[in-house]
Amino acid sequence: MSNPVICIGSALVDDLFHATDEMLMHTTNEVNMTRSAGGVSRNIAHQLSLLNVPVQLISVFGNDVDGNWLKQICTKAGIQLDSSITADVPTGKYTALINRDGSMFTALLTNAALHLITPEYLQIHESLLSNASYILVDANISVASINWLIEFTKQHAIRLIIEPVSVPPAKKIASVSFDGLYMITPNEDELPVLCSDDAISTEEQIKELLDKGIQNIWLHKGKAGSALYKKTETLQLSAPEATVVDCTGAGDGSVAGFIFSKFHGKDNLNSLRTAHTLSAEILQVNGAIAPGVTEKKLLQLVSKYYSE
């Protein structure tokens, strides 16, 4: 078996409330509710497993009904949970209000107890981590643990990807020592808070992060696509057209698509195309996973969306 991808971070219960009309402040809004398994790292692990990539998830599950439900879904999807933690804490929840057009109105996150993933805990699992092909970590875990992972992966020549998740955790990890990091994947809201106040323009912000020793900065631009910045080159790729049903997990799917492609030895441009394709498919379904997208179908869809 190939060396696994290891995903470290949140596993959550997603409660999504879809508005049936325009959302209004300070009054009652009618919604339809769906529940699904979520969490950035869990979502990425789930999608990778559906694409036949061997994957391990290091996360925290509550010793409760929700935690057991989440673990069953992960196991059924083929995600290995040997190194995850089950603790006497409530399972974390992500609650989102979704506009009628599929965009997010707002979202709420309750404690997922990720403080339990400490540098000391990661050190116990050095044997597993040292055999990873890629390590993906979301910024919900502690700064100390992210610093430990950057140093560990630098020493072992393992590609580490940091997903900032949202503005608050992105701001939290701005103090991280990024030297040697393979990739960080901010969107246009998260990029500025990763940088100093002196870096005002996107170009200045990208340069500042590259100068800190990050090898690749993958900037997500929503409907405008994305750009991958290195010191030696910049790649820009437009996003394919998609009818948006639910934006939940589209960014996670994009990262999963990129890792899937790199896992199979593809170059950056092909990996961006695969990333955008998987993201487009997730936008067109409720929830954070595109369950019908197999490895074969994904490659066919890439050819459809990027026929040139």
Image: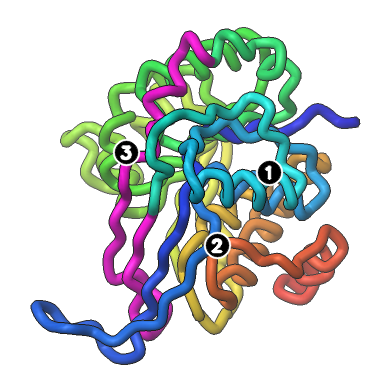
- Find residue 32 and report its image quarter: bottom left
Tag 3: residue type? Pro
Q: Secondary structure at mark 1?
A: helix
Mark 3 surroundings within 10 Å by alpha-carbon count, few (fewer than 14), some (14 through 19), many (20 or more): many
Which quarter of the figure is the N terminus placed in?
Answer: top right
Mark 1 vs mark 3, foreground winner is 3
* Residue 291 picture location, percent across and down: 71, 66
Tag on residue 259?
1
Name the residue beneath numbered marker 2.
288
Foreground of the two, 124 or 272:
124
Residue 4 sits inside the magenta stretch: no
Which quarter of the figure is the C terminus placed in?
Answer: bottom right
Tag 2: residue type? Ala
Name the residue beneath numbered marker 3.
169
Asked whether residue 308 appears in the rendered view, the answer is no
Foreground of the two, 211 or 221:
221
Q: CA distance from mark 2 to mark 3?
A: 20 Å
* Residue 134 picture location, percent across and down: 68, 30
Q: CA distance from mark 1 to mark 3?
A: 22 Å
Q: Residue at x 66, y 18 (%)?
A: 129
Upstream in sequence: badge 2 or badge 3: 3
Q: CA distance from mark 1 to mark 2?
A: 17 Å
Q: Is there CB contact under 8 Å for labels 2 and 3? A: no
The magenta stretch is 94-121
Q: Secondary structure at mark 3?
A: helix
